[in-house]
Image (cartoon, grey):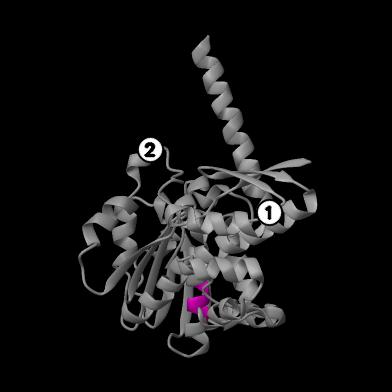
Amino acid sequence: MNERLILIEGIDPLALYGVNNVNFNLITSHFPKLKLIARGDEIKVLGEEKEIQVLEEKINRMIDFFRRYNRLTEDNVKDFLHETDDSISQAEEDFGEALVYGNNGRIIKARTVNQRMLVDKYRENDLLFAIGPAGSGKTYTAIALAVRALKNKEVKRIILTRPAVEAGERLGFLPGDLKEKLDPYLQPLYDALNDMIPARKLNEYMEDGTVQIAPLAYMRGRTLDNAFVILDEAQNTSMNQMKMFLTRMGNNAKFIVTGDITQIDLPRKEDSGLIPTLKLLQDIPGLSIIHFDSRDIIRHRLVKYIVHAFDKLSKNNEENSNQK
């Protein structure tokens, strides 16, 4: 008999187990050969390895469904357990239209609740703030919106910018031309564009200025008309930099600001201008703030077990330290 620990991540355990454990009881009754013990965000399972693998796959699919649609009903659980998931497939098809068709025919669209909200709020607002953890797709979705706007001729250019904090924006001390100096800091933006625009076309866009990637310092003094502008890693900007950037907004412009307030790289975290800017502007009509969370992070299945192992080690070390 094998023993396995299944970790519950990206969903409140109560949402998975259901009211009065109705969902958990359905799962348990569907796997009579397994013994399941639920303990908060962990399910201890005893039984044959093949059965455990089937159970884990179904639970992971339920969690993915919840992360996308922010719901998991008793009927949804039954569908997953009995593999009659036509309604689930239909829901996935209807969840969001393709934003762009990327290279190799890849369909790029909103795949989580908050990514969908960013797309919806884009229609109503010219200024958006997308705040949340790394890996939640906030920047990627924003760039997809920008590429779609360019292809639909809603704007004439795309401008992507980040504060080059690691270099203190003193780029003159770095070797090479401007592009070579900035590439290490701007590479994630290039990666997203390379997914969505053919390489030759992207090179043309960058040569004629249709697509521009520059450090935040180079925004000063510009007025950005007919442009889709994205400020990434905004948690590493000062209040003055935020004001400078936001006041660049010209006619027929769309601005999206993305940031993660838990990952401030400034020498003093309190110097970050993102949090006070959000508080200052939150009630202004015409802008919207979308908060991403762990449900939007789509990572390899192993990651949650790796994180759990490190958390367990840290907890054990802390307990041992307290006992001394």
Q: Could one spot residue 210 in this view of the protein?
A: no
Horizontal and vertical percent position of residue 66: 51, 64
Horizontal and vertical percent position of residue 10: 52, 54
Q: Is residue 288 left or right of residue 86?
A: left
The image quarter containing residue 227 is bottom left
- Label 2 or label 1, whichever comes before in sequence order: 1
Horizontal and vertical percent position of residue 118: 41, 71
Q: Is residue 144 magenta?
A: yes
Question: What's the residue at 52%, 22% (across, down)?
Answer: 318
Question: What's the residue at 50%, 54% (across, down)?
Answer: 17
Identify the main secondary structure in magenta. Answer: helix
- Asked if 100 appears above or below 47 in the picture, the reply is below
The image quarter containing residue 117 is bottom left
Point out the image quarter for the N terminus.
Answer: top right
Identify the residue under disc 1: 32
Q: Secondary structure at mark 2?
A: loop
In the rendered image, the residue lying farthest to the top is: 324
Nearer the observer, 302 or 24: 24
Q: How many marks?
A: 2
Q: Could one spot residue 287 in this view of the protein?
A: yes
Dot in front, 2 or 1: 1
Q: Secondary structure at mark 1?
A: loop
Horizontal and vertical percent position of residue 239: 30, 52
Identify the residue under disc 2: 268
Please report the bounds of the magenta region as a residue range: 143-147
> Identity of the amino acid at label 2?
Arg
Question: What's the residue at 38%, 40% (across, down)?
Answer: 269
Q: Is residue 36 left or right of residue 271?
A: right
> Identity of the amino acid at label 1?
Pro
